[in-house]
Amino acid sequence: MLGCGRLSVGVVGRLMYGRNTPGTAIEGEPSLLHRRVKRDLLHAVRSGKLQARLPSEEQLARDFGASRTTLRNALLELARDGIVVRRHGIGTFVVDGRRTVMNPLSRLQSLSSMIADSGFVPSVSAISVRARVRNPTAARALGRLDDARLTAIRRTFRADLKPAAVLTEFIPPSKALSEILATFDGNTLPLLDRLYGRVERAVATVTAVNAGRTVARELGISASAAVVRITQVAMSTAGQALAYTDGYLVPEVFTLSVVRQRE
């Protein structure tokens, strides 16, 4: 089972991502202020300005220029990401002050947003779009014939210019896809939302593997280095398989976290 931290070769986990994390009540939709406060709090934790036990919500709200509701929502998201732990009647405490990209496995969001939310500057490079690619694994995952040709979108994500991940999406070709790709910025979640209306969830498998020559070259690491491999199928509300992702993450850059609840 996955918790927080690095993965060892051979660890396997299957997860279902959703737009919201079960069991975490967030008041209202995240606003620009909400996101700003969360990022400012995260920066204060990463820089060491906030350590161990945090000040009261009232004090933090004053310090960060936000309402207590906004501040509380930001803290709830940080707790969901595994950055802090909230103990009822006692206080809020920093769990992990390391400077890494937090990847909450239970949340479905673009990788650029995830990198930005962790206090890094995201960028995308080496975008490659290939038409009529044959990938039997992706075709089967999308419920198509093994010899079906798909559009493959591959790119490298960076955090503060450091290579962080390589992702390839396999998507059924269409005229609408070709038109959207003309303004593609590297993030496929909004692209899929435009194509299909809304991506509701994704079923993913997480493993640890050796990078291999191609991934190693793209990430600037050795071929024998361990990387986190995530393969997933993005799905609509109706359960239709929309896209297949094959991604490789640098473990030193990412901290993977998942919230588990007792049944």
Image (spheres, rainbow, N blue to C red):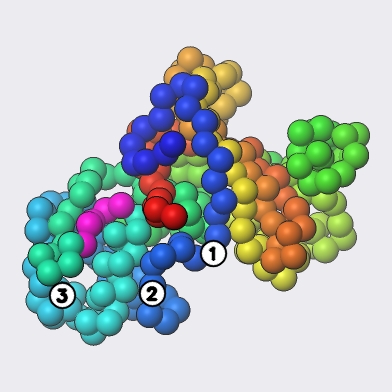
Q: Do the residues labelled 2 and 1 touch (CB within 8 Å)?
A: no
Q: Which of 237 and 170 is in front in this view?
A: 237
Residue designated by label 3: 57
Residue at left 62%, top 39%? 231
Residue at left 39%, top 67%? 24
Residue 84 included in the magenta stretch of the image: yes
- Name the dominant secondary structure of the magenta segment: strand
Q: Which amino acid does label 2 sit on?
A: Ile
- The residues bearing labels 3 and 1 have C-alpha atoms spaced at a distance of 27 Å
The mark nearer the N terminus, 3 or 1, is: 1
Horizontal arrangement in the rendering, residue 8 relative to residue 136 (left or right): left
Disc 2: CA contacts within 10 A as few (<14), some (14-19) or many (>=20): some
Disc 3: CA contacts within 10 A as few (<14), some (14-19) or many (>=20): some
The mark nearer the N terminus, 2 or 1, is: 1
The answer to whether residue 97 is above or below residue 79 is above
Numbered mark located on residue 19 in the image? 1
- The residues bearing labels 3 and 2 have C-alpha atoms spaced at a distance of 16 Å
Q: Name the image quarter holding residue 154.
A: top right
| Local secondary structure at mark 2 | loop
